Amino acid sequence: MKHSDITNRLKTHSYIHHSPQTLSVILSVWTLIMLAAPGVMLSVTEQMSWNARIANVFFPVGVFGLWLACSRRTAVVVLSTLPFMVLGAFQTVLLFLYGRSIIAVDMFLNVVTTNPAEVGELLGNLLSAILTVCLMYLPPIVGAVIGCVRHWRAGSRALSVGRRVSLSALIVALFAIAVSLTGSRPVRPLIDVYPLNVLYNIVLAVDRTERLENYESTSSSFSAHAVDLWPADSARRVVVIVVGETSRGDRWQINGYGRPTSPSLVSGGFVSFPEAYSESNTTHKSVPMLLSHLTADTFGDSIYSVRSIVTAFREAGFRTAFFSNQRYNRSFIDRFAFEADTTLFINEQPEASGVSFDMELLPLLKEELARGAARQLVVLHTYGSHFSYNDRYPEEFAMFAPYDYTDASSSAKDQLDNAYDNTILYTAAMLDSVASCLRSSGAEAAMVYASDHGEDIFDDDRHLFLHASPVPSRWQIDVPMIVWLSDPMASRHPGYIAAAYANRPMPVSTSRSVYHTVLQLAGIGSPLFDPELSVVSELYKKPARRYLDDHNRAVDLDAILAR
């Protein structure tokens, strides 16, 4: 064979395997795999029927395959799927973190209501997950850009095959859904099938965001009809609510934890409730329940028409203040904060240099107490134990070591645990300092502390981390609740302390009890007050164990934890 013939054959061979048509097919198939991958993963991770598994595998293949085969300009079509690639990357990271569940409504709302600093801290410690999604989704995007520049065109035969295969996959998915409708576990496309369920959750998230924007008008007529029940000439009265962040009740020494994480609270009149839990594992729902009379059973649409405990105190004649170590997050928390006479977010001030330590709220508390008002409510919203843990306490509180970690992974669990326990130590010291401020005021004073939710720190073989997962673990809803009364308050109302100690062994839903406990401690009457939910009441009763799910439905907590 002549040398020229061999050269021509090699050129022909190279052209066949690198022609625009061939590259278009490769790009289309790669993109289809990436777009369908979340459905395949969910069919493995979720508890669903076989019909639902079949639908999750074949429906994305059918729908995305038909779209990718709709035009010869494959590269352009691939770029049009970029929003779904972003959702796929989000879904992959979610599965990396929590091991299960679609992107929930609360996940989308967390994106909207989480400040950029928190996002940066989290992403900086999820390098392996970020690298994985980059390796999955960047190549087809880069390939599509190149294809657009070089004007790749798919062959008619390849498109025809793609359409037939995709249509067959879609028929299989629809048949599985149809068959399930006659059984005991029907497949609900908007709930059970990817990506329809994610798109539905986006619609719900947008609707909730729009309704929140109208909150001022929809809640304008609310009144707690609150009144001060104590005589006008009674002693000065001060109540402080400390809202914690991401603190687990089982990590507090005062609750029986084996480490000295709260030595300053072991004595001094602090009453802790070791069986406390939250009815939500997301801040934007748990804090509004802490600061209002709403619970998982009543949250629903009602949250858009009620106001917080701050309004109840103002109606009863109290001067009110809300000081936060958080940033603005455009949630109900911001709205509740600005109900107060004085509102200050220390990290939103022009001189703020970054995230502050929670102790920096104390000068604001002292300044407010120095006003000497006869009736005062102060709400302190802390940063608590929110990840990244090492950023939540100064070096002098780094008791538990080693605490340095470079990545949020199960291999770094010991360091993460130590850093997390240091945050508890610091929070306990802050609570002791708050009590000291109230003690120095000489007022009849009380403090109530509760965290919004807990946290997973690779606690079992599921290797779960953080919080706000669509299906919570018990560690995400396990929270501390602590009550402290000054000596003048305890002397005037000895029944409060007696009731608190008597109720201490009982389960407590912080989402239900904080509001009513604080009203009773302040001596405020309201039609909304329920003595069976106040932990300083002799009438306190064990609450129903409820949980506010992603679609704002109240469900049985124990059933959720069993999933």
Image: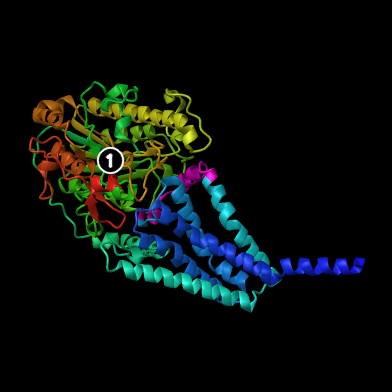
Assign the magenta stretch its main secondary structure: helix
Q: Residue furthest right?
A: 2
SS at circle 1: strand
Magenta segment boundaries in residue numbering: 106-128
State the residue position of label 1. 379
> Front-most of 309 and 168?
168
> Front-most of 385 and 218?
385
Name the side, left or right, on which 417 lies relative to 447.
Answer: right
Picture coordinates of residue 291 (x, y %)? 24, 46
Picture coordinates of residue 551 (x, y %)? 30, 58
In what quadrant of the picture does the N terminus appear? bottom right
> Front-most of 395 and 55?
55
> Front-most of 250 and 485?
250
The vertical placement of 193 against 407, above or below, is: below
The stretch drawn in magenta includes residue 443:
no
Mark 1 Cα-neighbour bin, 10 Å: few <14, some 14–19, many ≥20: many
Q: At label 1, which amino acid type do we have?
A: Val
Residue 44 visible (yes or no): yes
| Way the structure is coloured | rainbow
Quadrant of the rendered structure where residue 254 is? top left
Picture coordinates of residue 234 (x, y %)? 10, 34
- Counting every numbered tag in the picture gives 1
Name the side, left or right, on which 366 lies relative to 446.
Answer: right
Quadrant of the rendered structure where residue 220 is? bottom left
Name the side, left or right, on which 239 lies relative to 391.
Answer: left
Name the side, left or right, on which 125 lies relative to 499.
Answer: right
Picture coordinates of residue 508 (x, y %)? 19, 38
Residue 291 visible (yes or no): no
Q: Residue at x 60, y 61 (%)?
A: 140
Q: Residue at x 43, y 63 (%)?
A: 195
The stretch drawn in magenta includes residue 127:
yes
